[in-house]
Image: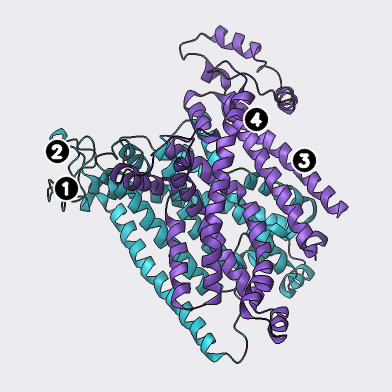
Chain colours: A purple, B cyan
């Protein structure tokens, strides 16, 4: 187990290094910050002066080092727009994003677990067909369109839910459903195939043979074992879930990191964009690590790699 | 993030019915056939969508850019106040919505297919390399895959577009370059399995070069896998493209694209629901039929493929 954790941590470091490299490269290799900062009619001397001022005339690896050593201490530079440290701006917007993500996860599980279990137990029946159809339709629905349709129906027509805003439980209903609906199809399919696979295992036969009632077989033996792949995938999908949260936020004007990122992109406020990208990536890496460890504890086969 | 996690996102293979359960086997076969039939129907619909996008100038009832302020925000023909000449109504400056939806398909399909071609090429080459050579090559490439998968695709696309500026070419490049990890991951796993097969060993014993083994002996076995992933990815890319356009970071108005039409329609959703609804329906229908076709292709080409 200790070796397993060590290996995971080593990989974590490498991934974080890669992410910082990527975030740095996007701004400094693909684009030129000075070009974005100065007005277009600025003179050549002006450009050179700014380049020197910002240290952009130094070799790339020196700049990268400066960026990383700052980032480690939580210093991503000041926002070019709001004159506050980018780190603080992003951190302030983090909680709403995390709440939304968690709410979406809960909704996804509430939809996916019962439907997936039902589809697996009534395999190849009309219920299964219906669930599969729902999943296929769900996967094809663009999240942002679903959000707008929900707003049109529930806010504009029925006037029962607020179209945007943050604070009360009513604000959570549509965004959480939207995000949950996006994650539910893949989760449902996983639950279904996981349960189907487990139901054919020898220990299920044993459980039945010893006279256990069918609900006990399903819940205690089948469902629990089917949960392992579901947990793993949900962990791996956390990045996608957060990506979904980004889309949801922009539709419902949710005051989270994503809205901030999109705003900052519009304002070309790169320190904030960089900081948001890195912090979100760190969050994902952290969740992935926890999931890996949890799964390693539940299922020793994964940890020993057999 | 672990190597074991690498294949779990994918649906676990269905386990065949236990022996002696003829009715269930029958049900399974019927199920499979139904899926194939749905796939075929979906392919038909997709063909229609592609044809209407390709022949847009011929079949669109109006010029998608023609402004007609007097008929602005006209509802669809079947609603009160709607006119037959604007079947799906008009937008905020009186452009015909049906024509714009038809033209909008061009952007989505072109972006979807070209981005997928780019990411499939990168991903397949890297996947082959990682799976065939193993060792350090594998480690480097798979670390790259992990880094890319950790990043939400949306976030990466947003950040790059922010620097490069929004345009059709930039969007194809971003979506193409960002999409390779899924190919690399699956192709790597498949290559590792094929590498151990006798015909590859035989090739090596005969003194074939690595390049020849990889491209002539291993790669042909992967075509069906690649086709299936690529098909399903086109749908993903179309959704992502429309999201970027929706945010105003993709295709710029007045060029009609489903995404930017949705974004514009959103401003008018209080009174004119149709502007945002129909482009969204178009995205939904297109991705739906592509997904159905991809699933059927998977069943047909390679039922054991875990995707």
Q: Which of B142 and A127 is in front in this view?
A: A127
Distance from the alpha carbon under mark 3 to that under mark 1: 58 Å
- Where is residue A165? Give x, y as percent: 44, 34
Label 2, secondary structure: give it: helix
Distance Cα–Cα, label 4 vs label 1: 49 Å
Q: Where residue B92 appears, x then y in whole percent?
A: 23, 36
Query: Residue at label 1?
Result: B86
Up-down: is A221 above or below B294?
below
Depth check, front residue: A227 or B124: A227
Q: Label 3 crowding class (10 Å Cα cut-off): few <14, some 14-19, many 20+? A: few
Q: How far apart are marks 3 and 2 (CA)?
A: 60 Å
Query: Which mark identifies residue A13?
Result: 3
Question: What's the mark number on residue B71?
Answer: 2
| Mark 2 and mark 1 residues within 8 Å of each other at the beta carbon | yes
Whether tag 3 and tag 1 are in contact, CB under 8 A, the answer is no
The residue that label 4 is drawn on is: A24
Q: How far apart are marks 2 and 1 (CA)?
A: 9 Å
Residues marked 3 and 2 touching at CB (< 8 Å): no
């Amino acid at each position: 187990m200790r070796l397993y954790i060590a290996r995971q941590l080593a990989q974590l470091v490498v991934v974080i290094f890669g992410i910082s490299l990527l975030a740095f490269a996007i701004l400094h290799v693909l684009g030129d910050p000075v070009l974005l900062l100065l007005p277009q009619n600025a003179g050549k001397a002006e450009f050179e002066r700014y380049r020197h001022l910002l240290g952009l005339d130094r070799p790339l690896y020196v700049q990268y080092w400066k960026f990383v050593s700052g980032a480690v201490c939580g210093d991503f530079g000041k926002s070019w727009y709001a004159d506050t440290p980018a780190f603080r701006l992003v951190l302030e917007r983090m909680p709403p994003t995390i709440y939304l993500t968690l709410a979406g996860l809960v909704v996804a599980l509430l939809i996916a677990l019962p439907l997936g279990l039902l589809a697996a137990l009534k395999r190849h029946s009309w219920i299964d067909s219906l669930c599969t159809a729902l999943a296929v339709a769900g996967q094809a629905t663009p999240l942002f369109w679903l959000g707008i349709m929900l707003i049109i129906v529930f806010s504009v027509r029925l006037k029962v839910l607020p179209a945007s805003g943050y604070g009360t439980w009513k604000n959570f209903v549509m965004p959480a459903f939207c995000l949950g609906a996006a994650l539910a199809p893949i989760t449902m399919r996983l639950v279904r195939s996981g349960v189907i696979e487990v139901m054919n295992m020898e220990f299920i036969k044993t459980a039945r043979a010893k006279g256990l009632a069918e609900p006990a077989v399903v819940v205690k033996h089948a469902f629990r074992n089917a949960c392992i792949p579901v947990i793993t995938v949900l962990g791996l999908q956390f990045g996608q879930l957060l990506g979904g949260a980004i889309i949801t936020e922009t539709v419902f004007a949710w005051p989270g990191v994503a809205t901030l990122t999109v705003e900052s992109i519009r304002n070309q406020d790169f320190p904030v964009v960089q900081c948001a990208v890195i912090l979100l990536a760190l969050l994902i890496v952290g969740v992935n690590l926890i999931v890996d460890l949890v799964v390693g504890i539940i299922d020793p086969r994964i940890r020993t790699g057999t | 993030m672990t190597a074991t996690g690498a294949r779990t996102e994918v649906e676990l293979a269905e386990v065949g019915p236990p022996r002696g359960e003829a009715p269930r086997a029958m049900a399974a076969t019927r199920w499979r056939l139904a899926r194939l039939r749905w796939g075929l129907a979906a392919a038909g619909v997709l063909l229609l969508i592609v044809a209407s996008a390709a022949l847009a100038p011929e079949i669109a009832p109006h010029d998608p850019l023609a402004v007609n302020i007097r008929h602005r925000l006209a509802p669809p023909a079947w609603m009160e106040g709607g006119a037959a000449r604007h079947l799906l109504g008009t937008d905020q400056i009186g452009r015909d919505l049906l024509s714009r939806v038809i033209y909008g398909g061009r952007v989505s399909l072109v972006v979807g297919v070209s981005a997928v071609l780019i990411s499939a090429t990168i991903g397949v080459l890297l996947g082959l390399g990682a799976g065939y050579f193993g060792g350090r090559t594998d480690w480097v490439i798979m670390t790259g895959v992990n880094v890319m998968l950790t990043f939400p695709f949306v976030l990466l696309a947003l950040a790059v577009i922010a620097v490069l500026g929004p345009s059709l070419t930039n969007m194809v490049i971003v979506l193409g370059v960002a999409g390779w990890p899924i190919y690399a991951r699956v192709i790597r796993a498949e290559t590792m399995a094929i590498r151990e097969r006798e015909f590859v060993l035989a090739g090596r014993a005969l003194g074939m070069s690595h390049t020849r083994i990889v491209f002539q002996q291993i790669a042909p076995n992967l075509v069906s896998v690649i086709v299936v992933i690529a098909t399903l990815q086109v749908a993903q890319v179309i959704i992502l493209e429309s999201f970027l356009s929706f945010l105003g970071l993709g295709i710029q108005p007045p060029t009609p694209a489903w995404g930017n039409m949705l974004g514009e329609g959103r401003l008018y959703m209080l009174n004119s629901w149709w502007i945002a609804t129909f482009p969204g329906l178009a995205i939904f229908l297109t991705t739906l039929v592509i997904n159905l076709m991809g699933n059927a292709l998977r069943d047909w080409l390679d039922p054991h493929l875990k995707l």
